Each structure stands twice: as C-alpha cells, then as structure tokens.
Amino acid sequence: MLNNIHCNRLLLFGALLPIVPTVILLWPQLFSVLLFEPSPRTYSIRIISYDPLMIYIVGFISWAERRYLLRLGQVQPTASSFVVTLTFSTGSLGLDLNEPHFQRSAVREDGKDIIHSDRTSSTAFLPHDDIVVQRIIKRASEIQGYTPVGMHEFLQLTRYREGQEFRAHLDPLEDLNMTMKHRLTTIYAILEATCENCGTQFPGMKVNWTAEDQSWCKYVDCDDHDALTVKAVPGNALFWKSYDSSGKLDSRTMHGGLPPETGIKTGVNIWTNG
C-alpha cells in the first residue's frame, strides 16, 4: 500500500510539472496583493456627466492588482489542459493554464464574433473565479449599489500596441447562452499605459473644459474641443451607463479606443448585464 501511495504521489507530481513554472511566476504578484493590499480598496470619484451618467474613478485598481492581472492575462496555453485551484481563507485562485491568453480582438455581428478592421487590438478573458478577479468584480458591484455578482461578465483585458485601435462603437446587445442581455454599464480601467494621446474618446460628447477646474486636465484632454477624450491613467477607471432613462441605448456613449503612436495601453472591461 505504501508503494502505491508513493507511486500515486510521483504520478501527481509528474502531472503538475508542466504547470509549476506558471504558478511560480504568478505567486509573487498574488502574494503582494493579498499581503500588502487588503480589500476593500479606497478610491475617489469625480462626476463627468449626470446625463448620460459618467463617473471618473481615481485609484480603482491598485499597483499590485494591476501587476497581477497583467501577468494573469499573459499566461500561455500548455500542451495539455490543466486547471489549478489554490484555496485561501479569503477565496480561491483558479488558474486555467489554457486560457486566458491574448488573441486578436473580435466584434460581434448577428450574434457571432468576427475579426473586423474596426478593432485591431488584442484581447484576453480572465478566469471568473480567480481571487483577485473576484475582488475587482466585487468592487465594481459596490460602486453600482451592490449589483448581483451574476450580472457581471467575465473580465476582458484589451491591449493596444502602436497603431492599434477600436473605432467608435456602442457596447452592444449581447447574446449569452441563447439569452439576450443588455450591457447596462461599463467600467473601463487602465492597467498600464506607456503611450500619449491613447485614451478613450466619446465623439458624441463635448465639454468646455476652459470653464471647468483645471484639475480635470490630469484625467481628460482639455485641448479636445470636438469630443470628450479621457486619458489613459494607470489605476484609474471610467464608469458610464449605456442606456438612457427610457431604456434605450444612449448614442452619446459611443466611444473608441484611440491608437497609441508609440508605446502600449492595456485596460480591463468590466461589463454589467441586465
């Protein structure tokens, strides 16, 4: 019997060998989050617009959380499918080592995801049960008045390299598991940005920033007089409501991801369905 136990342990160790390097790579970032940055996180808000509702959030995602999510999004597929779950007193870290990894972003047309020239960025979906992902979802829920966790989609990382963009669009009607749902709200948070003039632009909205406090210029492009352009500031986020009071999709929330001239931008989409 002892020989069988010893053999089983060897087989288990052998099965885990392909995934050990990934767990080791992720552990320093996870350790930093759990030890040094207890949840809930303190952040502050600034209201850009009441109609449509648009709120700028300063300090929504911490430095350690950003570092961890970026690493998680870069996990590459292995030859075999493995799922690892590490259990902590505060939750579990679920790592699917086949997903996520960055791929060319798609757009949805007629209920199908297709590659389109309007969207040239890359995308990675994050595992929903990851302990840090759950922290971010909980935070997004709290800021919206404790929306049910089940209303939130899988978090989506979006990465823009030089010249890559997502032209102006509305966050559309989603067909999930043959059920039509609306993306009622969006929170777009910046994880990294080494680029200039690579923010999120709302062509249907205009603000006369010369009449506003110039502190806004840290967060928005005060020189853009033709549209509302929100700068890409790591750690900060933008929340907006996509539907008006009558329940119709608000065309003023049409927005686009501007292409970096140099550098890179990576953000995370947090969508709430209804």
Image (cartoon, rainbow, N blue to C red):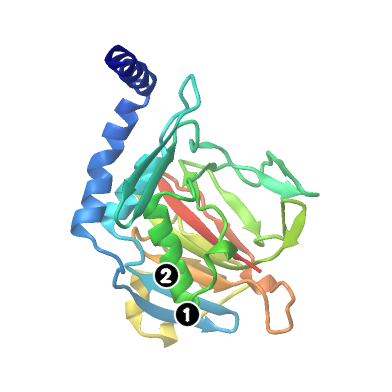
Tell me what residue is drawn at x 56 percent, y 77 percent. 206
Query: How far across and down, in percent of the image, does residue 29 sit?
Result: 26, 45
Tell me what residue is drawn at x 49 percent, y 21 percent. 80
- Amino acid carrying mark 1 in the image: Ile
User: Which of marks 1 and 2 precedes in the sequence?
Assistant: 1
Query: How far across and down, in percent of the image, does residue 238 sit?
Result: 46, 68
Of helix, strand and loop, which one carries label 1?
strand
Do the numbered discs 2 and 1 sit on residues whose CB atoms are within 8 Å? yes
Residue 208 appears in the rendering: no
Tell me what residue is drawn at x 41 percent, y 34 percent. 75
CA distance for labels 2 and 1: 10 Å
Quarter of the image that includes the N terminus = top left
Q: Is residue 120 left or right of residue 111?
A: left
Please name whichever residue, 270 or 47, is drawn nearer the observer in this view of the structure: 270
Please name whichever residue, 52 or 36, is drawn nearer the observer in this view of the structure: 36
Q: Quadrant of residue 26?
A: top left
Quarter of the image that includes the C terminus = bottom right
Please name whichever residue, 239 or 69, is drawn nearer the observer in this view of the structure: 69
Q: Which residue is mark 2?
A: 220
**10 Å crowding of disc 2: few (<14), some (14-19), many (20+):** many
Query: How far across and down, in percent of the image, does residue 85 sit?
Result: 39, 40
Tell me what residue is drawn at x 42 percent, y 63 percent. 231
Q: Is residue 86 above or below residue 153?
A: above
Residue 48: assigned label: 1
Q: Is residue 42 above or below residue 172?
A: below
Q: Quadrant of residue 27?
A: top left
Of helix, strand and loop, which one carries label 2?
loop
Residue 78 appears in the rendering: yes
Residue 132: assigned label: none
- Amino acid carrying mark 2 in the image: Val
